[in-house]
Amino acid sequence: EDIAGLLFVGLISATENYFRDILGFILSVCPISQSHSADEKIQLGSLLWSNAELHNRTAFEFMAFSNADNINKTINNFVYYQIKKGGTWEAMLKEYDKLCEIRHAVVHSGHIVAGKNAVKLGLNRTKKPLRVSISYAKLQEAGGICTALVQAANNELFEMMVGRWAEKWRALPSWSNDNSDRVFSTLYNAFLSNRDKQNKAISNQQSKNRLMSQIKIDFNL
C-alpha cells in the first residue's frame, strides 16, 4: 500500500511537472504570453538558484498545479488563454481534481480522507475515518486520467500556439518571415512526444513539413 501511494503521488507530481515545463516553454517563445504576464511576480530565490536556460520555468516553481483552479488561473494569467468549454481538457481536469483530493489524504494525513476533501469528493459522512486504499487497478486508472489530461492539454496548447504563429505573431513588430519555418519547427518539437512517437502511439501523425504546409493552406499564408 505504501509503494502504491508513492507511485500515485508520483503520477500527480509528473503531471504538475508537465505543466511547469510546457508553460515555461510557451513563456520563452510567445510574445503574447510575455506581454500579458509581464507584471506577474516570481520568487527571487528561484531566480537566483536556477540556470539561465531555466529562468522561464522558475516563474511556476512556487505554484501548485494540483487542482483545476490553479491550472486555469495560471493558463489565463501567464499564457492569456481560456481552456475550451466542453473540451477534453476541461473534462479531464474535473477527473484530475478528484485525484488531487485523494492525493491530499495520501501525502498529508496517512491515507485518511480529511473532511474538506471528502466534501469536495461528494462522499457520504461516515462514523469511522475514511482511508484511501490504492490497488493496482486503481493506480492504472489514475495513470490513465493523468495521461489523458496531459495529452488533451498538449493538443489544445499546440493548436493555440500554431494559431498564434499563423496569425497574431505576424502582426507584431518583432515578427520576421525569415524565421517563420524555424519557429514552427521549435513548436513542433516542443509539443511532440518522443516516447509516443517511438512507440507508434500517435495515430495519423503528420511529418513536420506536411503539417506546416497544411496549416499554411488553412490560414492562407
Image (cartoon, rainbow, N blue to C red):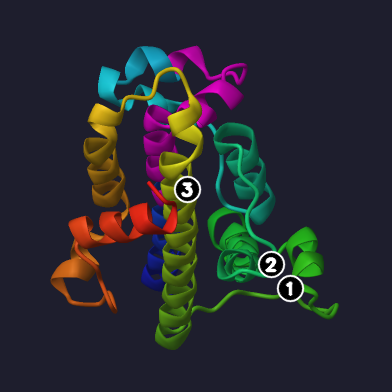
Determine if the magenta segment contains residue 114. no
Q: Quadrant of the N terminus?
A: bottom left
Mark positioned earlier in the residue sequence (3 or 1): 1
User: Where does label 1 land, which residue?
Assistant: 129
What secondary structure do most residues of the magenta stretch adopt? helix
Q: Looking at the image, which residue is at 45% across and 32% down?
A: 169
Q: Quadrant of residue 212?
A: bottom left
Q: What stretch is highlighted in magenta?
A: 18-45
Determine if the magenta segment contains residue 33. yes
Numbered-mark total = 3
User: Where does label 3 land, which residue?
Assistant: 163
Horizontal placement of 150 versus 212: left or right? Answer: right
Where does residue 69 sit, x and y in percent of width and height? Answer: 69, 50
How far apart are labels 3 and 2 at the CA level? 43 Å
Question: In the rendered view, would you say 104 is above or below 139?
Answer: above
Question: Visible in this render: residue 51?
Answer: no
Mark positioned earlier in the residue sequence (1 or 2): 2
Where does residue 73 sit, x and y in percent of width and height? Answer: 67, 42
Q: Looking at the image, which residue is at 44% across and 52% down?
A: 219
Question: In the rendered view, would you say 117 is above or below 70?
Answer: below
Q: What residue type is labelled 3?
A: Gly
Where does residue 213 sit, x and y in percent of width and height? Answer: 27, 56
Question: In the rendered view, would you say 216 is above or below 133?
Answer: above
Horizontal placement of 49 versus 103: left or right? Answer: left
Q: What residue type is labelled 1?
A: Pro
Mark in front: 3 vs 1: 3
Q: Looking at the image, which residue is at 64% across and 60% down?
A: 84
